[in-house]
C-alpha cells in the first residue's frame, strides 16, 4: 500500500480506533502499539482491504481482535487494574467542570468493570454511533448478542452511576 | 424509559480523548517503511511469480463474486443437488439390471428360431465375400430382397 493511501486511512480512522483501543486496553502504550500494528499490517498486506465494503467496520474488527489478543498475551487485565490504581487512564477528554470531570472519572471507572465484550459493544454503540447490525458485523457476533450485550452493559453502568448521575441532574 | 434515554444521552455526550498528534508521523513512518520494504521484496521476487498470479486471480474472482455471494452459493448448491441426483440414479441402474428376470427358455427358443429363419432367408454366404481383394462387380438388383420381403 502506497504512502498516500495509508495516510488517508490514518486520517479517517485513527481517532475512532484509538478511542476504541484505549477503552479496551486502558493502557496508552498498548494502544499505541496496537494502532501501529494495524497500520503496519495494512501497509504490508494491501490486499487486506480488497473487496471490503465498510472500511471502518473492517478496521474495528482488526482492532478488536488485536486488543483481545494483546490482553490475553500480556495479561493486560491485571496490568490495567494496577495502572488504574497508579494512574487514571480515561478514554474521555478532560474538562474544567468539576461535576463533569467527576462523572467522566466515574464512567471511566465503571466501564473498566464491564467485561471486555460488553465494553466493546457499549463503546461502539454510544461513541461511534454504530447500529447493532454494524456492531454485529464488525465484531462478528449475532445481532441479538450485540443487542443483549449492550443492554446488560448499559444496565450495569446505570446501576453504578445512578447516585452521581442523580446528583449532577439535581 | 425517559430516564433511560436521558442517561444514554448523557453517556453519548461524553467526549473521547483525541489521538496524540505526534503519533501520526511516528506510526505512518513505520508503516511506510514496512510497505516500501515489502514492495521491494516483491519486486525482487518478480511480479509474475505464482503466488502473485494466484493473488491476482483471487482478487479478480473476489471482485466478480463479491456482489452476490449468496447467489453464487445458491448456484453451487443447485449443482451439488444435480450431481447428487445424478449419482443416485446411476447407483440404481445396475440394481435394476440385476433384478430384471432372465429370459425364459421359450423366449430363447423363439429367438433362436427367428435367427435360423433369418439365416435361411439371407442364404448361404459365399466364401468369396470374405475376400476383400475381390473387385466389385455390379449386379442386377437382387431379387432375393423381394423374396425376403414377400416372405
Image: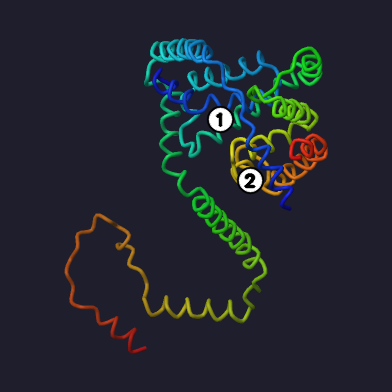
Residue at 67% of width from left, 48% of height from top?
A143
SS for callout 1: helix
Q: Position of residue A38 (x, y in %)?
A: 56, 21
Residue topped by disc 2: A132
SS for callout 2: helix
Residue at 65% of width from left, 29% of height from top?
A64
Circle 1/circle 2 CB separation < 8 Å = no
Please give the count of numbered marks on the rendered protein.
2
The chain under label 1 reads: A
Residue at 80% of width from left, 29% of height from top?
A113
Residue at 49% of width from left, 36% of height from top?
A52
Q: Position of residue B120 (x, y in %)?
A: 41, 78
Marks 1 and 2, the one that precedes in the sequence: 1
- Indicate the quadrant containing the C terminus of chain B: top left, top right, bottom left or bottom right: bottom left
> What label sits on residue A59 in the rendered view?
1
Question: What is the quadrant of residue A74 in the picture?
Answer: top right
Query: Is A5 positioned to the left or the right of A27 in the image?
Result: left
Q: Position of residue B140 (x, y in %)?
A: 18, 77
Query: Is B53 positioned to the left or the right of B70 in the image?
Result: left
Q: Nearer the viewer, residue A41 or A93?
A: A93
Colour mapping used in the image: rainbow
Residue furthest front in the image: A170
The chain under label 2 reads: A
**Does B8 sit above or below residue A58?**
below
**Does B10 sit above or below residue A12?**
below
Whole-number angstrom distance, CA of label 1 to CA of label 2: 17 Å
Front disc: 1 or 2:
2
Q: Position of residue A101 (x, y in %)?
A: 70, 25
Q: Residues within 10 Å of mark 1 (few under 14, many from 20)?
A: many
Amino acid at each position: 500500500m502506497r504512502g498516500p493511501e495509508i495516510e488517508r486511512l490514518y486520517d479517517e480512522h485513527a481517532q475512532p480506533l484509538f478511542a476504541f483501543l484505549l477503552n479496551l486496553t486502558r493502557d496508552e502504550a498498548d494502544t499505541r502499539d496496537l494502532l501501529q500494528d494495524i497500520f503496519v499490517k495494512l501497509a504490508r498486506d494491501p490486499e487486506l482491504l480488497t473487496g471490503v465494503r465498510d472500511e471502518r467496520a473492517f478496521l474495528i474488527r482488526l482492532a478488536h481482535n488485536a486488543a483481545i489478543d494483546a490482553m490475553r498475551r500480556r495479561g493486560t487485565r491485571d496490568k490495567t487494574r494496577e495502572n488504574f490504581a497508579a494512574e487514571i487512564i480515561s478514554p474521555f477528554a478532560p474538562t474544567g467542570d468539576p461535576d463533569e470531570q467527576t462523572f467522566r472519572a466515574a464512567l471511566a471507572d465503571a466501564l473498566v468493570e464491564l467485561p471486555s465484550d460488553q465494553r466493546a459493544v457499549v463503546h461502539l454503540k454510544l461513541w461511534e454511533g454504530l447500529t447493532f447490525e454494524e456492531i454485529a458485523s464488525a465484531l462478528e457476533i449475532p445481532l441479538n448478542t450485540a443487542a443483549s450485550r449492550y443492554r446488560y452493559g448499559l444496565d450495569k453502568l446505570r446501576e453504578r452511576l445512578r447516585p452521581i448521575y442523580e446528583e449532577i441532574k439535581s | 424509559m425517559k430516564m433511560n434515554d436521558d442517561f444514554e444521552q448523557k453517556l453519548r455526550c461524553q467526549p473521547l480523548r483525541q489521538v496524540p498528534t505526534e503519533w501520526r508521523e511516528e506510526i505512518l513512518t513505520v508503516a511506510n517503511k514496512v510497505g516500501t520494504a515489502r514492495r521491494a521484496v516483491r519486486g525482487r521476487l518478480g511480479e509474475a511469480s505464482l503466488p502473485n498470479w494466484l493473488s491476482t486471480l483471487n482478487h479478480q474472482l473476489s471482485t466478480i463474486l463479491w456482489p452476490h455471494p449468496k447467489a453464487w452459493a445458491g448456484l453451487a448448491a443447485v449443482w451439488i443437488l444435480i450431481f447428487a441426483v445424478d449419482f443416485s440414479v446411476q447407483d440404481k441402474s445396475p440394481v435394476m439390471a440385476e433384478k430384471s428376470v432372465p429370459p425364459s427358455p421359450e423366449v430363447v427358443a423363439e429367438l433362436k428360431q427367428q435367427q435360423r429363419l433369418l439365416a435361411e432367408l439371407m442364404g448361404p454366404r459365399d466364401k468369396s465375400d470374405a475376400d476383400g481383394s475381390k473387385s466389385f462387380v455390379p449386379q442386377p438388383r437382387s431379387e432375393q430382397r423381394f423374396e425376403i420381403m414377400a416372405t
